[in-house]
Amino acid sequence: METVMRILLIIASLFLIASILLQSGKSAGMSGDIAGGAESIWGKNKGRSYEGKLEKATAASAIFFLIASLILVAIQ
């Protein structure tokens, strides 16, 4: 059981790292704001955009990482 949890923890950490690195920085969109890209950032379809999906994936992987870490500590 401990080995399975360690493998799941490693997978969750790699997915968390990848989803964080794929996100663009907050200052990277300044030229897009001037050109009218603010609608895609603050619009109602943000959850369907690439950035919105990455935010959800990051949050889900962070929650899974925390739960897997707590379970692994409880097992030991």
Image: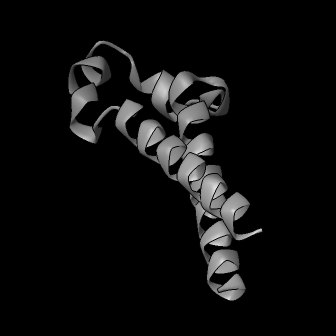
Kindly identify the residue that appears in the image at 28 percent across and 37 percent down.
25
**Color scheme of the displayed model:** one colour
Image position of 29 (left or right of 75): left
User: Residue extending furthest right?
Assistant: 1
Position in image of residue 56 (x %, y %) = 62, 43
Residue 51 against residue 7 in the figure, above or below? above
Q: Is residue 69 left or right of residue 42?
A: right
Quadrant in which the N terminus is drawn? bottom right
Q: Position of residue 29 (x, y in %)?
A: 28, 27
Q: Position of residue 63 (x, y in %)?
A: 64, 62
Residue in the picture at 66% in, 59% down:
64
Nearer to us in this view, 1 or 65: 1
Is residue 59 visible to us here? no
Q: Is residue 64 visible?
A: yes
Quadrant showing the C terminus? bottom right
Of residues 15 and 72, the one drawn nearer to the viewer in this rendering: 72
Front-lying residue, 10 or 40: 10
Q: Is residue 40 above or below residue 71?
A: above
Q: Is residue 28 left or right of residue 11?
A: left
Q: Residue at x 39, y 18 (%)?
A: 37
How many discs appear? 0
**Quadrant of the rendered image containing residue 8:** bottom right
Residue ID at (71%, 83%): 75
Q: Is residue 37 above or below residue 47?
A: above
